Amino acid sequence: MSTMLKTVYGLAVALAAAPALAGPAQTYQVKDPYQQQHLEIRGNRFDINTVGANSNLCQIDGRFQRQGNRAVFKDGEGCEVRFRFEHDRVTVDSPTEAAATACRHNYCGHNVIFTGEYSRLPAACTDQGIKNSEQRFQVAYRAGRFAEAARIQQHSLNRCEDFMWFIDRMSARNNLAAAHKNAGDQAACRRALTPFVADPAKGPDIEFNLSTIWREDFDRQLQAAQSHWQQCQP
């Protein structure tokens, strides 16, 4: 896990102070690079944890009542969360806007949500899975096996990019671009950068409220992308 994401989770744990859950966990995540939404389920206990690009948090945990492929949580103060289970996905919402508003008021910071479609997180995309892939990439890269390093990084991106936080996605694609550049494949280097950069001179093609907490990491990755882009021109 990147230093930035360690900070994210550290903030979430420190501020949420959620009780420990017992038993094997099922971990899900919304595929949104600009808002990390995690759902962990152990038995009839759940923990929803969101960190937004604005650094605000949303954390709801408790016990739900389950019937078949549906479950519901009520906190007794107006908040109601519904869960619908289907294969490797869990859809989380509230039955009414009033219930959703109560949940946001009680548990969420500004402009951070808990609703959405959560997908099961593949083992390769967990913290340990990503760490293992990064280690294999670094071993190949430092040994000068740049084409092999690029294959390792591309495989990780193919499986996990949809689950990545936007700065981690930028970092992974910068690593991929560097490997292709050093392997002598300038076209592949440029292709590695274009999915998250519409115009490398301007930055990501999206407007969002970026917290100052992430600004240094974001600027570092953007500068690296711009440098790779210039070096990989034909």
Image: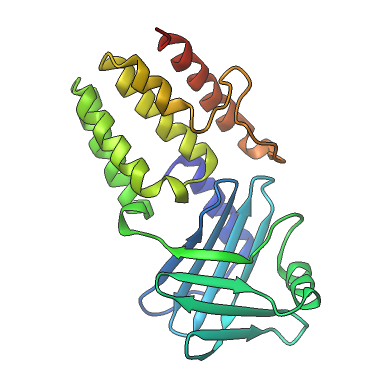
Note whether 98 is above or below 109 in the view shown: below
Residue 121, x across and y down, in percent: 40, 60
**In percent of the image, x 59 and y 26: which residue is there?**
219
Note whether 21 is above or below 171 in the view shown: below
Residue 74, x across and y down, in percent: 67, 85
Q: Hey, which residue is sitting farthest top in the picture?
A: 234
Q: In which quarter of the image is the C terminus?
A: top left
Q: How is the protein colored in the picture?
A: rainbow
Q: Which of 13 and 143 is in front in this view?
A: 143
Q: Nearer the viewer, residue 23 or 123?
A: 123
Q: From the viewer's perspective, is 97 left or right of 54?
A: right
Residue 183, x across and y down, in percent: 25, 17
Note whether 98 is above or below 64 in the view shown: above
Q: Which of 197 and 166 is in front in this view?
A: 197
How many numbered marks does the figure carry? 0
Quarter where residue 178 is shown: top left
Q: From the viewer's perspective, is 124 left or right of 81?
A: left
**In percent of the image, x 58 and y 63: which residue is there?**
49
Residue 135, x across and y down, in percent: 27, 38
**In percent of the image, x 62 and y 84: which residue is there?**
73
